[in-house]
Amino acid sequence: MTGRGPRGERGEQADRILAAARRSFAARGYAATSLRSVAQEAGVDPGLVHYYFRSKTGLLEAVMQPPEEFGAAVAAAAEQPLDRRGRAFVEANLSLWEDPASAEILRAIILTAAQEPAALQRLRELFSELVLAAVSHSLTDSERNLRASLIATQMVGLVMNRYIWQVGSIATLPASAVADLLTPTVQHYLADPLPTELGNT
């Protein structure tokens, strides 16, 4: 494909630029990545990076967007009855990380956030929004936020140990076994009563 015209909703060239930027931000960090180096790795003219993303900040914002399937999967889990929502939430996250295409994007987001404050803030906002969606809206804001934070400890720990660091037995267990092990804890954080002194934090 030549020229700047998009192919479908996204241009093939824009997708190549995004993929190159994800690799560079994750490996070298935001500060050490230049638009010219991204263009070179993507095999496109540097002007196309400006055309599609306007600036390095715009490119970072695009890199930090999760796959469309991510929000949809978590939203679907949040619609499950409360007594099944914990398992649905765990399985939704596992299914996305077990898929190589979405896992590549999610891994780049996390590694970029580890090196760039603006990216970390975006990741915090994203994760907070998605986890809060799974927690009952009938609860007070303080209890919803606490429950979401508790769930996040489990999900972030899972992602880091199984998919990023790949350490320990959790990295090699079948996804179904991981779901069986984590679901009771996540379900507890979702629905079981919290200690009174914590529930009012």
Image (cartoon, rainbow, N blue to C red):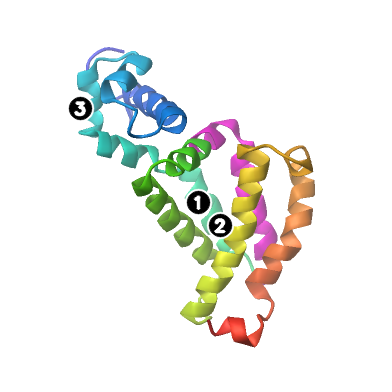
Residue at point 20% right, 27% down? 51
Name the residue that disc number 1 marks: 72
In reply to whether residue 87 is colored magenta, the answer given is yes
Q: In the rendered view, would you say 82 is above or below 173?
A: below
Name the residue that disc number 3 marks: 51
Q: Earlier in the sequence, mark 3 or mark 2?
A: 3
Residue 172 relative to residue 29: left or right: right
Q: Which residues are magenta?
A: 82-105
Dot 3 and dot 1 residues touching (CB under 8 Å)? no
**What number is the disc on residue 76?**
2
Task: Determine which quarter of the picture holds residue 129.
Answer: bottom left
> Where does the image place residue 182, in percent across and percent down from the top left?
73, 57
Q: Earlier in the sequence, mark 3 or mark 1?
A: 3
Say which amino acid is labelled 1. Answer: Ala
Q: Is residue 5 visible?
A: no
Q: Nearer the viewer, mark 3 or mark 2?
A: 3
Dot 1 and dot 2 residues touching (CB under 8 Å)? yes
Residue at point 56% right, 36% down? 103
> Where does the image place residue 135, in percent across and percent down from the top left?
56, 70
Give the spatial CA distance, label 3 vs label 1: 29 Å
